[in-house]
């Protein structure tokens, strides 16, 4: 096949060697220092964090005699402690100011029958003296505690809840998690990944590039691009990078000699990393503590490889149609896997969108 047919990069190709991070930082400084880069790092939240508030039906009753409120609260909570819903407040102001009562009390969750019940059916005597309560009614309440402010805003429209805000998530969603200096470094690393993707495209390979960085030192440990072919269809950019990091640790298995743009630096491990996350041989996993920058969202294979190698954070430019860090799956944030990591999208998004997506339909 002709080179032209393979070349899918619409951005102008660079053929010069990868610029160093320091060079890129100097370039960035040479421009207007006040000007923020035209991209935003957006956190890819877990399904639970980003999903809609799930509701379940519960029984509540109007408090007709306010002087009985604290006694009723104590007795009802003792009979129905709602251990799985500690976020639900027991008493709320009546949502309709026109009603004669001013307070309503949550009694218990409704079973699958969801029929109307009397106070006597819901609150056994003599544990609860139901004096002061009115006729029970059904009301939808949030089944789980809200995790983000937007979930909290939605949850409280149904029933008042407590909210223990994760300040880091709030700052991330507001786009102010990273300092200007951090953003400049992130941009430099992603520019290196874009350069690697362009090297791949110039050789007729899939235009995906990736860089592994040790955030403790800012050192680039591996630069790689997609090397997949009919003979080796699984050499996606992230897989190549993980192998290059392993090579820096004296291991590695792929023959990347035909791809000079794929490079690695010998690892210098901080002693503390070993204690944090070790495998059975007493060695840290390949990418423990490291960040991966990749031009497009990794596929399921690559995302799972990143879980296995215990990467710390993944930054990608633009989503992939079969992506597994936000689009089709969120493999970085699953409670049933034994490693979770942070994922952010949008770094140099405009440039990265011009490059190839990552996927298992690799070019043969
Ligand atoms: Zn992949």
Image (tube, rainbow, N blue to C red):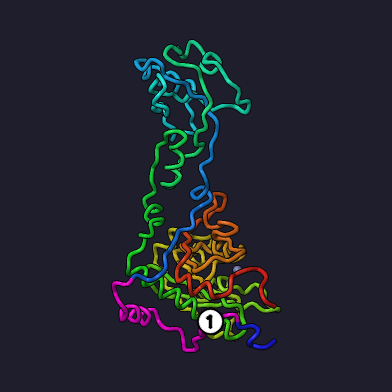
On the rendered structure, is 132 left or right of 123?
left
Up the image or down, 243 lies above or below 274; here it is: below
Mark 1 vs ligand 1: CB under 8 Å?
Answer: no
Quarter assignment of residue 205: bottom right
Quadrant in which the N terminus is drawn = bottom right
Q: Residue at x 47, y 89 (%)?
A: 16
Quarter assignment of residue 185: bottom left
Element type at mark 1 = helix
Counting from the top left corner in percent of width and height, residue 350 is at 48, 72
Quadrant in which the C terminus is drawn = bottom right
Viewer-proximal residue, 93 or 344? 93
- Figure disc tally: 1
Viewer-proximal residue, 344 or 243? 344
Q: Residue at x 42, y 27 (%)?
A: 96
* Residue underneath mark 1: 198
Q: Which residues are magenta?
A: 8-35
Q: Residue at x 60, y 64 (%)?
A: 321
Up the image or down, 68 lies above or below 47; here it is: above
Picture quarter with ligand 1: bottom right
């Amino acid at each position: 096949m002709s080179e032209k047919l393979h070349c899918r990069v619409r951005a102008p190709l660079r053929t010069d060697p990868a610029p160093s991070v320091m060079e890129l930082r100097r370039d960035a400084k040479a421009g207007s220092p006040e000007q923020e880069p035209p991209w935003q790092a957006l956190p890819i939240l877990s399904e639970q964090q980003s999903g809609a508030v799930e509701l379940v039906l519960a029984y509540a009753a109007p408090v007709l005699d306010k002087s009985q409120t604290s006694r009723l609260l104590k007795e009802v909570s003792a009979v129905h402690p709602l251990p799985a819903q500690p976020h639900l407040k027991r008493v709320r102001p009546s949502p309709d100011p026109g009603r004669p009562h001013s307070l309503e009390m949550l009694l218990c969750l409704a079973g699958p029958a969801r029929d109307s019940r009397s106070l006597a059916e819901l609150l056994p005597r003599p544990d609860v003296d139901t004096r002061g309560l009115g006729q029970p009614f059904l009301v939808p309440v949030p089944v789980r505690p809200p995790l983000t402010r937007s979930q909290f805003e939605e949850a409280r429209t149904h029933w008042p809840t407590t909210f223990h805000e994760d300040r880091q998530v709030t700052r991330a969603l507001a786009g102010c998690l990273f300092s200007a200096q951090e953003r400049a470094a992130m941009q430099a690393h992603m520019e290196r990944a874009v350069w690697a993707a362009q090297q791949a495209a110039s050789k007729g390979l899939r235009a995906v590039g990736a860089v592994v960085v040790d955030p403790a030192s800012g050192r680039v440990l591996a630069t790689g691009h997609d090397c997949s072919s009919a003979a080796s269809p699984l050499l996606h950019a992230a897989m190549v990078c993980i192998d290059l990091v392993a090579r820096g640790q004296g291991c590695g298995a792929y023959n990347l000699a035909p791809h000079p743009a794929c490079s690695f630096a010998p690892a210098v491990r901080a002693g503390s990393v070993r204690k944090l996350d070790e495998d059975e041989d007493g060695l840290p996993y390949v990418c423990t503590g490291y960040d991966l920058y990749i031009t497009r969202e990794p596929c399921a294979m690559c995302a799972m490889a990143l879980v296995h190698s215990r990467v710390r954070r993944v930054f990608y430019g633009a989503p992939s149609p079969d992506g597994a860090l936000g689009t089709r799956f969120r493999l970085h944030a699953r409670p049933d896997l034994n490693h979770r990591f942070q994922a952010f999208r949008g770094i140099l998004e405009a440039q990265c969108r011009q490059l190839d997506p990552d996927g298992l339909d690799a070019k043969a």
